[in-house]
Image (cartoon, rainbow, N blue to C red):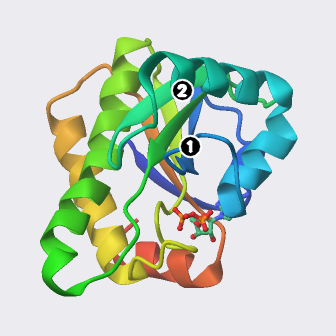
Amino acid sequence: MDKRIKLQQGDITKLQVDAIVNAANSSLMGGGGVDGAIHRAGGKQILEECIKIIDRQGRCKTGNAVITTGGNLPAKYVIHTVGPVYNGGKNVLKEEEQLANCYSNSLKLAMENGIKTIAFPNISTGVYRFPKQRAAEIAVATVDNFLAENEQMKDVIFICFDDENFGIYQKLGL
Ligand code: ADP
């Protein structure tokens, strides 16, 4: 496991990093869970930039990522990525690939913006119902692979809000 991957438990809106990642929905208009917390703490500047992005490019596709200011947050930027809604069954491989894309596309966008420290929430494991164990395996493997090819990134933090996710990430060796 790459030593630049760190585990923390708590509220992502409190983190002083270059960028925090938001588990957004395709409208980028905010919502519940971590999305609501980020917009509440970050203030209206984030939503204003999201509206401009939607005007320019339309809805954000599942697995893609866009970047805005961090507004009033301690983080300088917010990277908004749209996780898959988990249905399982015959869609499961596609949903797993989309979840991996959330992590890799967020990291790519971070690199393009000179971001060296970034924190991820447990994308799709709330109202989007992705099984937490599988989501954690995908998240850690995708970030670890990315870091192996990218020297410039300094720290990638997985910040778990709930005890269950925190325990799962600890068991994965973080
Ligand atoms: P999704 O729609 O992608 O499932 P949710 O926001 O419902 O998004 O949940 C994603 C994860 O974010 C969940 O594991 C939830 O515990 C976590 N979460 C909720 N609030 C916060 C917060 N303030 N900081 C970090 N993680 C959070």
Residue 46: x and y in percent read 72, 27
The residue lying toward the viewer, choosing from 161 and 28, is 28
The percent coordinates of residue 104 (x first, y second) are: 27, 41
How many numbered marks have been drawn onto this rendered protein structure?
2
Residue 2 position (above or below residue 10): above
Give the label on residue 27, or none: 1
Q: Earlier in the sequence, mark 1 or mark 2?
A: 1
Task: Give me the C-alpha separation between circle 1 and circle 2.
Answer: 7 Å
Q: Is the CB of the residue bearing disc 1 within 8 angstroms of ligand 1?
A: no
| Residue tagged 2 | 54
Q: Against 17, is 100 above or below?
A: below
Q: Residues within 10 Å of mark 2 (few under 14, many from 20)?
A: some
Kind of residue at badge 1: Ser
Determine whether label 1 and label 2 are within 8 Å by CB.
yes
Determine the secondary structure under disc 2: helix
Residue at left 50%, top 30%? 117
SS at circle 1: loop
Q: Tell me: 108 left or right of 123.
A: left
The three-letter code of the residue at mark 2 reads: Ile
